[in-house]
C-alpha cells in the first residue's frame, strides 16, 4: 500500500456532515468524473469508491450503479466503476459543477465555512492527489487537472486557508504542487488522517535532526581543517624565523607561544591559549595568541620585503 493510499483510506473513515459531503463530492466528481449524459467515475480504491457511492445514494436519494472489474495489466487489480443515470442535471447543479449543460466553478456561497473548503479540497485530493512517502523520497504533494482555471482555483482555495501552493503546466495537464514539509504535514492533519500525520511527522523530525547533525559535523570538520591549516602555516612561519636568524628578535612571551605551538601543532588558538595559561605563569587568551602570530607574520613580511629590495 502506498503512502497516498494510506492517507486516502484514513480520510474516508472520518464522518462528515451533509454540507461537507456535498463539498467533498463536488471536488471529487469535478476532478474524477466523466459527464456524458450521465456521471461516470472509475476508481482503484475500494474505500474511496464506497464513500462516493454511499454519499451519492444518501444525499440525492438515488441508486448508483457500481461495476467491479479485474484489470490484468502488469498485475491483477480491481477497478470500481460508479455510474449515475438518475437526476444527473440536478446533481451537477447542486454540486456546482455544471449549470445549463455548461461547466462552472463553485460560487463563493458554496463555501460558507472553512470546513467546507477543507471538504472540497479533500474531495479533490481523493480524486487526483498524491503525496510522496517521506521515508523514500522528498516532500511533495500534487493535484493534477486538465484545465488551467481549475488549477488556479485550487491554488486560490489553498490561499484562503493560508496555504501557499504553486501550479505549472506539465505536458497537457496542470499540476498544483507543494514541496514544503511543514505545509504538507498541516494538510494531512487538516484532512484528519491522524496516523498518516504522525508517521509523516516522525519521518520529518528524524530527517531534520539527521540533516542538522550532518550540518554540525560538516561545520566541525571544516573548523578542524581550518585549525590544522592554520597550525601548519604557523609552524612554517616559526621555521622561517629560525632559518633566517630572526627568532632571537622575539620577546619572551612570543617565544613561549611559539614553543607551545611547536608542541601542539593541531590545537586551535583557544585551546593553545588555555594550555599556555595552565602550564606556565603567562596568562593569555585566544586574541593574545593571535596577536603574537600577527607580530611574527609582520616580522617575516618585513624581512622578505628587505630581501626583495
Image (cartoon, helix red, strand yellow):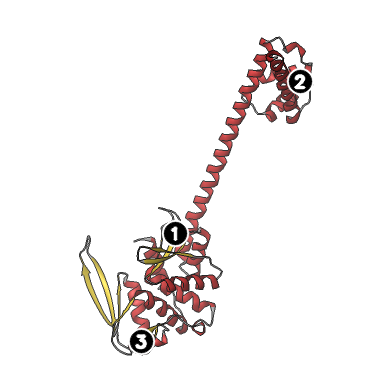
Residue at left offset 47%, top offset 71% = 152
User: Where the N terminus falls, by quadrant?
Assistant: bottom left
Label 3 CA crowd tier, 10 Å (few <14, some 14–19, many 20+): few
Residue 295 appears anywhere in the view: yes
Residue at left offset 46%, top offset 76% = 119
Which residue bears the numbered disc 1? 140
Circle 3 — which element? loop
Q: Where is residue 255 shown, x and y percent of the image?
A: 74, 16
Which residue bears the numbered disc 3? 101
Label 1 CA crowd tier, 10 Å (few <14, some 14–19, many 20+): some
Residue 6 image-quadrant placement: bottom left
User: Where the C terminus falls, by quadrant?
Assistant: top right
Q: Relative to residue 7, is residue 25 depicted above or below?
A: below
Mark 3, mark 2: which one is toward the viewer? 3
Which residue bears the numbered disc 2? 280
Label whose residue precedes the other's in the sequence (1 or 3): 3
Report the Cα–Cα distance between label 2 and label 1.
60 Å
Amino acid at each position: 500500500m502506498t503512502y497516498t493510499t494510506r492517507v486516502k483510506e484514513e480520510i474516508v473513515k472520518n464522518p462528515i456532515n451533509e454540507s461537507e459531503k456535498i463539498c467533498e463530492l463536488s471536488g471529487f466528481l469535478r476532478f474524477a468524473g466523466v459527464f456524458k449524459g450521465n456521471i461516470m467515475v472509475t476508481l482503484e480504491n475500494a474505500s474511496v469508491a464506497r464513500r462516493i457511492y454511499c454519499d451519492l445514494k444518501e444525499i440525492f436519494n438515488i441508486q448508483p450503479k457500481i461495476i467491479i472489474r479485474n484489470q490484468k495489466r502488469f498485475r491483477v487489480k480491481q477497478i470500481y466503476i460508479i455510474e449515475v443515470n438518475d437526476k444527473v442535471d440536478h446533481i451537477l447543479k447542486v454540486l456546482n459543477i455544471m449549470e445549463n449543460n455548461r461547466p462552472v466553478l463553485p460560487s463563493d456561497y458554496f463555501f460558507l465555512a472553512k470546513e467546507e473548503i477543507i471538504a472540497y479540497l479533500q474531495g479533490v485530493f481523493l480524486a487526483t492527489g498524491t503525496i510522496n512517502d517521506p521515508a523514500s523520497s522528498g516532500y511533495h504533494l500534487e493535484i493534477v487537472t486538465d484545465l488551467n482555471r481549475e488549477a488556479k482555483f485550487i491554488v486560490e482555495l489553498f490561499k484562503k486557508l493560508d496555504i501557499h501552493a504553486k501550479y505549472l503546466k506539465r505536458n497537457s495537464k496542470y499540476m498544483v504542487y507543494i514541496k514544503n514539509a511543514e505545509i504538507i504535514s498541516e494538510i494531512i492533519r487538516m484532512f484528519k488522517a491522524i496516523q498518516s500525520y504522525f508517521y509523516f511527522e516522525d519521518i520529518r523530525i528524524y530527517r531534520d535532526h539527521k540533516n542538522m547533525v550532518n550540518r554540525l559535523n560538516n561545520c566541525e570538520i571544516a573548523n578542524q581543517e581550518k585549525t590544522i591549516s592554520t597550525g601548519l602555516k604557523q609552524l612554517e612561519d616559526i621555521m622561517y624565523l629560525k632559518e633566517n636568524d630572526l627568532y632571537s628578535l622575539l620577546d619572551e612571551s612570543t617565544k613561549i607561544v611559539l614553543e607551545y605551538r611547536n608542541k601542539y601543532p593541531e590545537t586551535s588558538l583557544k585551546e593553545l591559549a588555555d594550555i599556555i595559561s595552565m602550564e606556565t605563569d603567562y596568562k593569555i587568551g585566544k586574541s593574545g595568541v593571535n596577536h603574537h602570530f600577527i607580530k611574527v607574520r609582520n616580522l617575516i613580511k618585513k624581512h622578505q620585503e628587505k630581501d626583495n629590495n
